[in-house]
Amino acid sequence: MQEKELRKMSRMELIEIIYALQQNEKGLRAENEDLKKRLEDKSIKIEKAGSIAEAAVALNSIFEDAERAAEQYISSVREMQEENRLKAEQILEGARVRAEEMIREAEKRIKN
């Protein structure tokens, strides 16, 4: 509106215009607040998504470390089992040799 038109209006018309502008301003402020909240919610969701992604990467790293540790443990247990198996075979072979010697000695005694 031009200034001349505003000057020709009555007080009541001007008050109605001011009131309408105030209502419009309230609506815009409310919309602005709503948009700010929605933006903040989206920012929080984005941050959470980033945090979740970071946590997933960290967990993957932890799981990889745990898997490597488990593989090392299993490998060392297998090595120990192999060592124990070899020792057991040696002991068993020694026992067979000793048993054969004892049998030969017993047979010699019986013959004599």
Image (cartoon, rainbow, N blue to C red):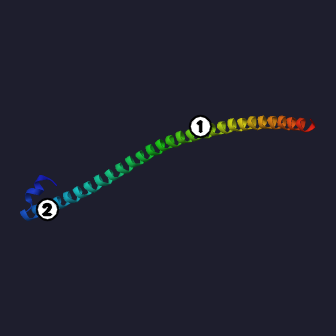
Q: Residue at x 63, y 39 (%)?
A: 77
Q: Amino acid at mark 2?
A: Tyr
Residue extending farthest left: 11
User: Where residue 28 sits: x, y (%)?
Assistant: 23, 56
Residue shown at 31%/51% (left/top)? 40
Q: Nearer the viewer, residue 64 or 76?
A: 76
Q: Amino acid at mark 1?
A: Gln
Where in the figure is residue 21, as x and y percent of width and height? 17, 59
Q: Quadrant of residue 89?
A: top right
* Position of the C terminus by quadrant: top right
Q: Position of residue 39 (x, y in %)?
A: 32, 51
Residue 19 is tagged as: 2
Q: Which residue is mark 1?
A: 72
SS type, badge 2: helix
Residue 8 % position (x, y): 8, 59
Q: Residues within 10 Å of mark 2 (few under 14, many from 20)?
A: few
Corner quadrant of residue 69: top right
**Eyeballing the image, is 6 above or below 68?**
below
